[in-house]
């Protein structure tokens, strides 16, 4: 495959995937300007973990009970695995088959932002633990984490296999659909047990530096969720094959989401096996995961099999998800105007309003 191959077809006439490869990266006119807007949103949110003061967290960690240390450390290890996969998987799975420059640019931006998350976990570990190597070396020895790693990699691996071998075109498109669906579930559900625990510590005035980093990460994940939701809708609109596949694979997509939700509930039980913490326990987290999972499923047209309340079971998490003024150092608040061309508001239900899907 040539790095640059002159195409016969206009970029405006191409499909998102499996069409002629991207040649000229041009953004004066785009088939899907909404994807470029998502990229700009992510770039406007650029941050570095070293900007966040976590100097107090070491003292806080030393004061935690043993089961609280288990909750904090286990979540950190699992987040490392999630972003280790997501930091490379979109590039490996989607870039070889992408056909539009604005989508190619987004995928590269998406993967880059995940690497910032991975670096942030190292920043936290270096500042809290006497021997960071022990934390990293132990990650995949934990069955509950290694099982999660296998689960989140599966659909990506299927697509990579399809990209590299002779594959029926419909089967190839099915692999694209399920990989994108898996990414949607990962970005929208898999992090939130860990997020809630981090914020619960901060509500108790403990591990506040870590919680601020997690707030930045959550803000990014909301952009990534918006991107996969948008691409799932666009694929159905541009290609009747994907519209057919979305119906054909609906039961498998529901099973994928249910598996993710059940894994997160099992993870919550693992975290709290030795005790709860003030304001949070395994049951509350299970209710929260079902609630947020159903919310994500409905957004992409899937029926949720769980009976959930309309209200967030953990309403105090909303301020961590929706607010954009994050204190990153003592007496210093994040100032959006530092970012040239930055976008100040967070990703919410109105972020992509007005865009045609």
Image (tube, rainbow, N blue to C red):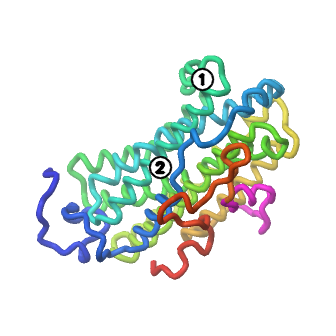
Specify few, some or many for label 2: CA neighbours under 10 Å numbering under 14, 14-19, or 20 or more.
many
Tell me which numbered mark, 2 or 1, is placed earlier along the sequence. 2
What residue is shown at x 78% (from left), y 43% (from top)?
A: 202
Q: Position of residue 141 (x, y in %)?
A: 57, 23
Question: Could you say whether the residue bearing mark 2 is in a helix, strand or loop?
Answer: helix
Give the answer, above or below, for where 87 lies relative to 315. Answer: above
Q: Nearer the viewer, residue 50 or 203?
A: 50
Q: Position of residue 81 (x, y in %)?
A: 53, 36
For the C terminus, which image quadrant? Answer: bottom left
Confirm or deny contact between disc 2 and disc 1 (CB under 8 A): no
Q: Nearer the viewer, residue 55 or 201?
A: 55
Q: Residue beneath label 2, please?
A: 113
What residue is shown at x 59% (from left), y 21% (from top)?
A: 132
- Determine whether, in the image, residue 170 is placed left or right of residue 291: left
Question: Could you say whether the residue bearing mark 1 is in a helix, strand or loop?
Answer: helix
- Asked if the magenta segment contains residue 145, the reply would be no
Give the answer, above or below, for where 46 lies relative to 230. Answer: above
- Asked if the magenta segment contains residue 323, the reply would be yes
Q: Residue beneath label 1, please?
A: 135
Give the answer, above or below, for where 16 lies relative to 207. Answer: below
**CA distance for labels 2 and 1:** 23 Å
């Amino acid at each position: 495959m040539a790095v640059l191959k002159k195409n016969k077809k206009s970029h405006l006439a191409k499909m998102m995937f499996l069409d002629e490869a991207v040649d000229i990266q041009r953004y004066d006119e785009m088939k899907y300007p909404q994807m470029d807007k998502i990229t700009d949103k992510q770039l406007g949110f650029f941050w570095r973990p070293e900007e966040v003061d976590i100097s107090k967290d070491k003292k806080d960690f030393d004061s935690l009970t043993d089961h609280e240390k288990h909750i904090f450390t286990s979540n950190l290890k699992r987040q490392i695995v999630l972003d280790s996969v997501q930091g490379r998987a979109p590039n490996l799975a989607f870039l070889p088959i992408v056909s539009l420059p604005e989508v190619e640019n987004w995928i590269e931006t998406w993967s880059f932002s995940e690497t910032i998350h991975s670096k942030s976990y190292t920043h936290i570990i270096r500042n809290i633990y006497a021997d960071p190597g022990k934390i990293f070396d132990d990650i995949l020895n934990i069955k509950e984490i290694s099982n999660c790693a296998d689960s989140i990699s599966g659909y990506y691996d299927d697509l990579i296999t399809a990209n590299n071998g002779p594959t029926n075109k419909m089967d190839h498109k099915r692999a694209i659909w399920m990989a994108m669906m898996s990414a949607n579930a990962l970005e929208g559900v898999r992090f939130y047990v860990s997020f809630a625990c981090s914020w619960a510590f901060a509500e108790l005035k403990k591990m506040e530096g870590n919680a601020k980093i997690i707030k930045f990460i959550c803000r990014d994940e909301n952009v990534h969720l918006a991107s996969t939701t948008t691409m799932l809708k666009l694929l159905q609109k541009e290609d009747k094959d994907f519209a057919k596949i979305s119906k054909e694979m609906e039961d498998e997509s529901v099973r994928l989401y249910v598996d993710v939700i059940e894994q997160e509930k099992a993870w919550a039980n693992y975290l709290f096996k030795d005790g709860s913490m003030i304001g949070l326990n395994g049951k509350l987290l299970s209710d929260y995961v079902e609630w947020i999972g159903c919310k994500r499923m409905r957004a992409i047209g899937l029926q949720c099999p769980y009976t959930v309340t309309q209200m967030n079971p953990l309403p105090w998490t909303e301020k961590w998800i929706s607010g954009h003024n994050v204190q990153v150092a003592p007496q210093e608040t994040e100032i959006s105007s530092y970012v040239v061309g930055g976008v100040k508001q967070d990703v919410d239900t109105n972020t992509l309003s007005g865009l045609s899907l």
